[in-house]
Image (spheres, coloured by chain):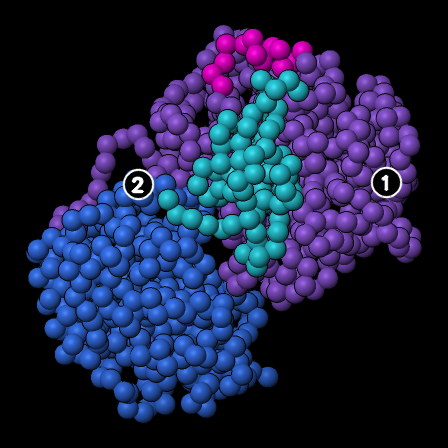
C-alpha cells in the first residue's frame, strides 16, 4: 500500500499504519493480541467479527465500550485496549 | 434526525439489497439501515472473491435511488410505524447528526437482519484468536493480515469451506478443516446441490482451493491451548485426540437467525425463526421478512426472498407471487441444510464445569446447570445480562439445555441513554410539584 | 396422603422467601409455592435500595427496623447479593427543598437514624457529576444497595436449611380455609396461608385494596465511579406520595458492577410489561437534568415491573378478617426489598401468636375493612385521593 493512502492511528500509544477500510478491531490485533479484559481480567479478542459478541470493545478517543469491529480507522484515532475504564 | 419512507429495509446483505433495489425500482421512497461499515452483509463483505452476481447486485444497490444509513443499527421501536436508529460512531463522531439518534418512519418495513454464527463453549474458547469462522473471514476482509498464519477451521456447515478457501487465497495455511457432521449426514445436501449446479460448482471450487488441507468429518476441537493467546488446538475424531499448532482457530457451528427486532415488533416466531407467508409477510401487517431469519437457506434463497418482499411491500403482488413459486422449489435446500448441520449430541459435553459460557459476564457452565430455564439462570447468575444481551451464550444454552431466550426488550443493542430517551420532541417532564 | 403444613407461603419473591425463613426459624413446618423460580417478579424488577422512608410514623418504624435487620444480616449474605452500604443522597434543588432536608435530618435523628446535611459545595465534591447549583443534600449513611434476586435466593436457601420445603413450581389457582389449590389439581393443607404474591396478590384475593403500579428502570453498561451514592431527588418523596398521577423522579443507583440503574416512574392502569416510551423519555430527561452527562452512557436494557400499591402507602401484613387461615404479606409498593425482613418477623409473630417487636396494628389489613366493609379497591383509592 502506497504511503499516502495509509492511515495512522495509535493503539495503546503505539502508532499503527493501516489501509483505508481497515476496522479498528483489525488495527488492535495488528498492534497487539487482544481488545478487552473480561470482568474477571482475562484477555479477550473479537469472536464474531460482526458487531454481535461485544468482545471487540475498546475505548476510542477516550470513549469506552466501542465495538471496534464495526468502526473504521480514521487518522489520529486514539484506541485503548484492555481496560474497562474511564468516564468522560 | 427524523426521516419518513414508503419502505424501510433493515439489513444490507443479499436479502436486504435485493429487497431495497426491487422496491426502489418500483418508484417508491426506500431507506436502508445497516450496521456494517459497508453494504454486503456478512457473505458479500468487501474484499476479494465476490462472485459476479454479488458484484452486479452491489452495483444496482449503489445506483438505486436509496437513502442509506450505513453503520447504523436499530435500537428501539418508540411507536408503531417508527424505529429508532443509532450510528456506530455516535459517541465520538464530530458531527452532531451522527451523535443523535434517528427516528425512521415507514409505511412498510422489510426485515433482512441475517444470521450470526452459533458458538459452542469448550475449554479455551475464550482465548484471543479463537474466533468464529465467519468472524475470522470478516476480520480479514476488515484488514487483518492472514498471510503466513496457520488456521484450523472447525464447526459445521458450508461456511467452513468458503472461509477456508478465502483465507487460503489470502496466503493462510489451512492446517485442517473439521466438520462435526458425518459424511453420511452431509450426503443428502450434496444430492440436493446437484439440482443447483451453481452451488455445486462453488462448493467444488472451494474444495479445490483448499486441496492441500485435510478435510475431516466427525471431527471437532475439544480444547484450545495458549497463554495470552491461542497456541494450539486439540482435535478429536472417533475418540482419538491430537494437537495441532496454529495461530487461529476459526470455529462456528452453523447459524442462528437474528430475530430480535422481529420479536420486538411483535412478529410471530416459529421454532426460533420468523414466521413468513408465501409473500414473506410476517404476522404483523406491513412488516415483511426475508433471508436467514425465516430459515437458513443461503445467498440464492435470500436474494429471491428479498425480491419477493420488495415487490410485495411495493404492492406488486402478481410479480411477487410469480417469484414465490420459484421459492417454493428452493425450500427443500433449507431442510436439507438444517439436517446436514444438525449438531452431534457429543458436542454437549465439550465444556468443562469451569468453562465460561457467558463471555460478557464470565459465567461458567457449573453455575448454569442448576437452573431450570433461561430467565432463572439469567437472574441468578447474570448469564445473558451483558451487552451482547444473550446473543452469544443464548445460542449455546439453547443447544446445551434446550433453553429459549426470554422476551426482547429495548434497547435491542446497547444505545446511548439519551437515544433511548428520544431526541426529537420537546421535553415533557412531570415536575414533582405537579404531582403533589 | 396430604401433608399438613403449619404455614404455606404463596410467592417466592423476596418477601415470601424472608417469610419462609422466619417461619422455619421459629419451628413451623413451612412450604413455599411459586409458579416460577425464586425472586422472578417484582424482586427481579426492582432497584434493591434498602432505604429508610418517613411518609408516616408507621413507615418510618418498619423501614428503620428492617434496615437494621439487613445490616445485621449483611455479613452472612453471599457476594452475589452485592450488598453495599452506599448511603442515599437526598438531593435538594433549592432552598425550599433544603428546609425539607433539615426537617428530615431532625426527624431521623429522633428515630435514631444518623444523617448528615451537605451544603451545595459539599454535594458537588461528593458527586461531581451532578449539575452545578444544587442547594445541597441529606446523606443517610445507613441506606444500602443489594441485588434482590440473589438476596431472595439466599433467604430461600436459609429457609430450606432450617427445614422449609420449596415445592416444585406450580401455579396456585385458589386459596381458602386452609387449602391451597394448585394448577395440577392437587391441594395443600395449611394451618396458615401466607399470601406473599406482591402485585399478583389480588389474583387470588380480588377484594384486597391493592393496585398495580408499574415502574420503569434502565441499566447502563459499566462506568465505575460515575456516581458514588444512591442519588434521589427530594421531589421523589412528593412523587412517591402522590397516588393518582403518573410521575417520574430522578433516582439513580450505582451498582457494585459499575453499572447504573436509572429510575424511576410510577404509573397506574398499566397491566402489561411493555415500555411506555413517553414515560421512559420523561424519566431519562429527569435523570439528565440532574446528571447532565448520563445521556452519554450506554444503556443495556430497559424493563418494567409492578409494585403492589395500597391507598395509604403501608403494606398489608397480618390476619385477613375474611378468612382466619390467611396471613397477608403484600402491598409493599416500592419498599418490598427494604421491608421484607421486618415483614417476615411480623408474619412469624402473628402465626405463632407471639408479641411483635414493633406495633403490628398499623399494617393490619383490617384497617381498610373497618372503614369500608370490603369496598372495591377503586373506591378506596377515590377516597384516599380526595382525602
Chain C display color: blue
Give yes or no for residue C69 being in the magenta stretch.
Answer: no
Chain of the residue displaying label 2: C
Residue under the point 32% across and 85% down: C350
Q: Position of residue B342 (x, y in %)?
A: 78, 43
Q: Does residue B377 sit above or below C289 in this rendering? A: below
Chain under label 1? Answer: B
- Residue at 68 percent across and 22 percent down: it is B47
Instruction: Using the image, determine if residue C335 lies above or below residue C191.
Output: above
- Residue C56 falls in which quadrant of the image? bottom left
From the viewer's perspective, tell me whether residue A42 is left or right of residue C330: right
Q: What span is colored magenta in the figure?
A: B56-68
Residue designated by label 2: C281
Chain coloured cyan in this rendering: A
Residue designated by label 1: B176
Is label 2 in contact with label 1 (beta carbons under 8 Å)? no
Kindly report the distance in space between the C-alpha atoms of the residues bearing marks 2 and 1.
53 Å
Amino acid at each position: 500500500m502506497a504511503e499516502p493512502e495509509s492511515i495512522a492511528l495509535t493503539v495503546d500509544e503505539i502508532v499503527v499504519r493501516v489501509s483505508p477500510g481497515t476496522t479498528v478491531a483489525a488495527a488492535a490485533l495488528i498492534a497487539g493480541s487482544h481488545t478487552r479484559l473480561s470482568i474477571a481480567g482475562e484477555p479477550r479478542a473479537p469472536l464474531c467479527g460482526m458487531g454481535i459478541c461485544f468482545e471487540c470493545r475498546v475505548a476510542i478517543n477516550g470513549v469506552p465500550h466501542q465495538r471496534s469491529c464495526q468502526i473504521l480507522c480514521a487518522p489520529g484515532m486514539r484506541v485503548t485496549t484492555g481496560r474497562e475504564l474511564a468516564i468522560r | 434526525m427524523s426521516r419518513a419512507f414508503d419502505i424501510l429495509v433493515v439489513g444490507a446483505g443479499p436479502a436486504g439489497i435485493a429487497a431495497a433495489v426491487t422496491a426502489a425500482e418500483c418508484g417508491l421512497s426506500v431507506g436502508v439501515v445497516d450496521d456494517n461499515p459497508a453494504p454486503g452483509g456478512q457473505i458479500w463483505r468487501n474484499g476479494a472473491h465476490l462472485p459476479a452476481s454479488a458484484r452486479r447486485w452491489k452495483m444496482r444497490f449503489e445506483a438505486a435511488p436509496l437513502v442509506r444509513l450505513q453503520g447504523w443499527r436499530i435500537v428501539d421501536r418508540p411507536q408503531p410505524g417508527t424505529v429508532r436508529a443509532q450510528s456506530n460512531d455516535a459517541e465520538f463522531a464530530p458531527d452532531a447528526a451522527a451523535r443523535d439518534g434517528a427516528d425512521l418512519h415507514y409505511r412498510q418495513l422489510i426485515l433482512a437482519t441475517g444470521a450470526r454464527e452459533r458458538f459452542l463453549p469448550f475449554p479455551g474458547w475464550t482465548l484471543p484468536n479463537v474466533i468464529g469462522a465467519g468472524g475470522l473471514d470478516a476480520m480479514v476482509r476488515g484488514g487483518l493480515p492472514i498471510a503466513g498464519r496457520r488456521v484450523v477451521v472447525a464447526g459445521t456447515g458450508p461456511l467452513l469451506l468458503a472461509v477456508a478457501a478465502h483465507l487460503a487465497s489470502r496466503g493462510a495455511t489451512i492446517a485442517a478443516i473439521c466438520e462435526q457432521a458425518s459424511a453420511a449426514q452431509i450426503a443428502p445436501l450434496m444430492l440436493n446441490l446437484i439440482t443447483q449446479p451453481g452451488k455445486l460448482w462453488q462448493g467444488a471450487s472451494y474444495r479445490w482451493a483448499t486441496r492441500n488441507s485435510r478435510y475431516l468429518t466427525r471431527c471437532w476441537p475439544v480444547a484450545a491451548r495458549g497463554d495470552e493467546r491461542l497456541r494450539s488446538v486439540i482435535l478429536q475424531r472417533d475418540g482419538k485426540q491430537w494437537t495441532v499448532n496454529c495461530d487461529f482457530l476459526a470455529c462456528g457451528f452453523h447459524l442462528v437467525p437474528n430475530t430480535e427486532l422481529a420479536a420486538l415488533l411483535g412478529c410471530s416466531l416459529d421454532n426460533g425463526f420468523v414466521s413468513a407467508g408465501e409473500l414473506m409477510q410476517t404476522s404483523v401487517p406491513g412488516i415483511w421478512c426475508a433471508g436467514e431469519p425465516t430459515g437458513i437457506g443461503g445467498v440464492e434463497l435470500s436474494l429471491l426472498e428479498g425480491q419477493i418482499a420488495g415487490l410485495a411491500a411495493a404492492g406488486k403482488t402478481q410479480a411477487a407471487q410469480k417469484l414465490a413459486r420459484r421459492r417454493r422449489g428452493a425450500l427443500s435446500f433449507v431442510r436439507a441444510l438444517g439436517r446436514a448441520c444438525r449438531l452431534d449430541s457429543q458436542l454437549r459435553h465439550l465444556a468443562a464445569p469451569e468453562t465460561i459460557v457467558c463471555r460478557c459476564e464470565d459465567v461458567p457452565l457449573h453455575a448454569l446447570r442448576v437452573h431450570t430455564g433461561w430467565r432463572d439462570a439469567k437472574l441468578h447468575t447474570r448469564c445473558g445480562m451483558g451487552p451482547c444481551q444473550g446473543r452469544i451464550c443464548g445460542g449455546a444454552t439453547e443447544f446445551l439445555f434446550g433453553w429459549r431466550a426470554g422476551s426482547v426488550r429495548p434497547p435491542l443493542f446497547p444505545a446511548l441513554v439519551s437515544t433511548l430517551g428520544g431526541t426529537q420532541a420537546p421535553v415533557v417532564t412531570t415536575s414533582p410539584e405537579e404531582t403533589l | 396422603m396430604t401433608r399438613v403444613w403449619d404455614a404455606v407461603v404463596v410467592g417466592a419473591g423476596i418477601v415470601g422467601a424472608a417469610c419462609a425463613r422466619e417461619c422455619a426459624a421459629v419451628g413451623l413446618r413451612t412450604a413455599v409455592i411459586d409458579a416460577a423460580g425464586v425472586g422472578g417478579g417484582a424482586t427481579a424488577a426492582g432497584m434493591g435500595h434498602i432505604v429508610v422512608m418517613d411518609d408516616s410514623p408507621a413507615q418510618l418504624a418498619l423501614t428503620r427496623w428492617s434496615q437494621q435487620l439487613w445490616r445485621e444480616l449483611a455479613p452472612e449474605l453471599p457476594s452475589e447479593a452485592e450488598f453495599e452500604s452506599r448511603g442515599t443522597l437526598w438531593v435538594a434543588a433549592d432552598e425550599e427543598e433544603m428546609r425539607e432536608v433539615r426537617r428530615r435530618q431532625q426527624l431521623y435523628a429522633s428515630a435514631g437514624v444518623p444523617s448528615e446535611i451537605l451544603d451545595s459545595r459539599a454535594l458537588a465534591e461528593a458527586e461531581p457529576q451532578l449539575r452545578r447549583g444544587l442547594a445541597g443534600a441529606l446523606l443517610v449513611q445507613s441506606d444500602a444497595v443489594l441485588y434482590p434476586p440473589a438476596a431472595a435466593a439466599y433467604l430461600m436457601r436459609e429457609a430450606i436449611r432450617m427445614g422449609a420445603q420449596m415445592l416444585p413450581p406450580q401455579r396456585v389457582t385458589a386459596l381458602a380455609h386452609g387449602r391451597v389449590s394448585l394448577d395440577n389439581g392437587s391441594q395443600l393443607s395449611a394451618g396458615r396461608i401466607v399470601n406473599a404474591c406482591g402485585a399478583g396478590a389480588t389474583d387470588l384475593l380480588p377484594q384486597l385494596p391493592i393496585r398495580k403500579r408499574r415502574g420503569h428502570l434502565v441499566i447502563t453498561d459499566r462506568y465505575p465511579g460515575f456516581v458514588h451514592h444512591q442519588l434521589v431527588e427530594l421531589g421523589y418523596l412528593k412523587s412517591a406520595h402522590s397516588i393518582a398521577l403518573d410521575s417520574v423522579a430522578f433516582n439513580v443507583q450505582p451498582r457494585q458492577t459499575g453499572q447504573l440503574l436509572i429510575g424511576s416512574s410510577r404509573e397506574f392502569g398499566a397491566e402489561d410489561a411493555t415500555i411506555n416510551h413517553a414515560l421512559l423519555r420523561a424519566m431519562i430527561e429527569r435523570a439528565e437534568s440532574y446528571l447532565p452527562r448520563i445521556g452519554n452512557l450506554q444503556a443495556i436494557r430497559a424493563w418494567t415491573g409492578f409494585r403492589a400499591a395500597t391507598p395509604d402507602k403501608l403494606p398489608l401484613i397480618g390476619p385477613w378478617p375474611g378468612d382466619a387461615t390467611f396471613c397477608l404479606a403484600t402491598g409493599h409498593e416500592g419498599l418490598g426489598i427494604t421491608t421484607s425482613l421486618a415483614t417476615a418477623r411480623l408474619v412469624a409473630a402473628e402465626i405463632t401468636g407471639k408479641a411483635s417487636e414493633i406495633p403490628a396494628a398499623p399494617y393490619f389489613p383490617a384497617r381498610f375493612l373497618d372503614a369500608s366493609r370490603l369496598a372495591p379497591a377503586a373506591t378506596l383509592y377515590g377516597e384516599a385521593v380526595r382525602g
